Amino acid sequence: MSTPAQGGASVAPHVTPIAAGDAPRIKVEQASYAYAATDRSAPKFTLGPASFEARQRELVAILGPNASGKSTLLTLLAGLAKPLSGRIEIDGIEVSKLDIRTRAQRIALVQQESELLFPLRVWEYVLQGRYPYGRRLRFESDEDCLLAGNALAQVGADAFRDRWMDQLSGGEKQRVILARALAQRPSLLLLDEPTQHLDIGGKVELLRRLRKLADENRYTVLVVTHELNLAAEFCDRIVLLHKGKCLRVGTPAEVYERDLLGEVFEAPLEVEMRPGGRPRVILRGSH
Amino acid sequence: MRPLTPRRVFAICLALCAVLFVAVVISLRMGAYPVSVRDIVMTLVNATLRRWSEIPPDFQSIVLNIRLPRILLGILVGASLSTAGAGFQALLRNPLADPYVLGVSSGAALGAILSLLAAPHAPGLIQAAAFAGAIATIAAVYFLGRRGGQLDSGTLLLAGIITASFLSALIMFLMTTLPGRDVRGMAFWLMGDLTSPSSVDLKWLYFLLVIAVGSIYTTSSDLNLILTGEQEARHLGVNVHRVKLVVYVAASVLTGLAVSVSGAMGYVGLLVPHVMRMMFGTDYRVLIPASALGGAILVVVADTLARTVVAPIELPVGAITALAGAPVFIYLMRRRVR
């Protein structure tokens, strides 16, 4: 069943408000950013003002075609850059005002690939997640080892804790990188295209794992992804970006509209509503 | 899961200190005038306790005044170059980086050669000029290697390589166009050896060594994270800009220090950190002290060989470290690759 078209990419940003009384963990208010080659040159890329909120236990997908501003938004959320205007808060505190170690205790960022210069064992890599909690010279405590071990167990990577990082498959490595982020014990978990090098089984497994982590650990999880159907299946909320603009924020059913997605992704897409209220995107003419 | 503990770092350092002590005793024993191990140990013990009257004059002259200062200089140079090499490898995120990659040695050599041309017999001037040349190069490469107000590894490496080749060209120009000068003295700065005793008080050089190695050591857990990527390190709470600045300045000072007293001794700064990594792991909390001690051991052993293998002729230590270093490095690398 196709949803009726309710406007195209030119519609004003629409944000579904969070229920009153449930304080958002992350709050983005009109946050914008611009990249320039040099301080004096014109911006090469601009992310227009974006606003949305997310609570604990919520899994949020940031969707959009290439060069839509997804990674820029993630950089702002991670506190690695300060918004040019607006503000981003975590638990009521502006992210850019947190000192660097406190920020690392609250926000963990999982990037696509770790570039290791020298060989490292899996457990050594995961223990790095305890760095923000360390003392002088940061020798790890028994508690650090316990938490790193728990993180490995949570992602099902316990069996290869003694292997070298460069001997892992793409899926195994992804799990270990996630384990290091969990060892940070963050309240906000950010993932930048984590499904990129995974087969379909690995993608489903990862999203299931993130769903479980959000539910059990009370994390707020934000995932940048190109997987429209997996995002619709597993995520509570979608942030749709296009050409540096935040077009729509809401549940998958609210955001997945045929004309809107077709215009954003420049492809003939059809949206079906499945039983249970989760939409599914298919290529028009392919069935 | 056995994380690195201060006890393990201490044990490794203690073991390396023992090896260094053995190397020092053997080095003190080797030479034209034979001295027994017992006499060497007694001389060292008496000197440490300041019981000068109990040391025979011959031993005082040969062991304490001739052989020991040279060994102490070797320890200083080896520790400086190896620590600087380990620091630059992390700073530039490049396993092939060595202390000379950013042109510090060329700057020091140019300073030394200019002072040789201007005032060949002024005491201490040559070391001061070499150190000034190193510091001037550090400053120039720092300003050339910045991008967006911060030290960028790629830009820094390019700036260093270009500066080094420019300074080398200047050195070659001076050496070929100025006939009749002390070419042997100039070659020393390019090859590296310990035959010219330093006129600078070793205490001050050791003071600088401890400060610079200590500065790098305080950043060692930060460097562990920078090795997995600067962006990731920043996100894990590392002040990457501060760490890079500390390592850049300290490693450059160490290189300048070594080059100003021994010339550009090859291979030590590249080889030792890699050997220590293969032996004790990649963690910088153990790698920095292990590299300092390993470098000291290598230079003491190499200098002993340099002055005894074809005695009475002395070979430059740099030639020994390069001759022995390359095959050892290839062997270790192949063994690691399996």
Image: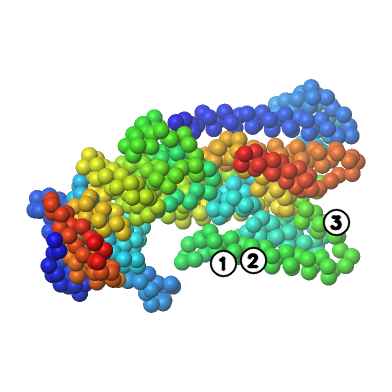
x and y percentages locating residue B112 in the rendered image: 75, 59
x and y percentages locating residue A164 in the rendered image: 49, 39
Give the Cα distance between marks 2 and 1.
Answer: 10 Å
Residues at circles 2 and 1 in contact by the CB criterion of under 8 Å: yes
Residue drawn at x 74%, y 67% as measured from the top left: B169
Q: Quadrant of the N terminus of chain B?
A: top left
SS for dot 3: helix
Q: Residues within 10 Å of mark 1 (few under 14, many from 20)?
A: some
Residue ID for mark 1: B144
The reply to whether label 2 and label 3 mark residues of one chain is yes
Residue drawn at x 9%, y 50% as measured from the top left: A21
Residue ID for mark 2: B162
Residue ID for mark 3: B184
Residue drawn at x 69%, y 33% as measured from the top left: B20
SS for dot 2: helix
Give the Cα distance between marks 2 and 3.
Answer: 27 Å
Residues at circles 1 and 3 in contact by the CB criterion of under 8 Å: no
Left or right, residue B125 beside residue B334: right
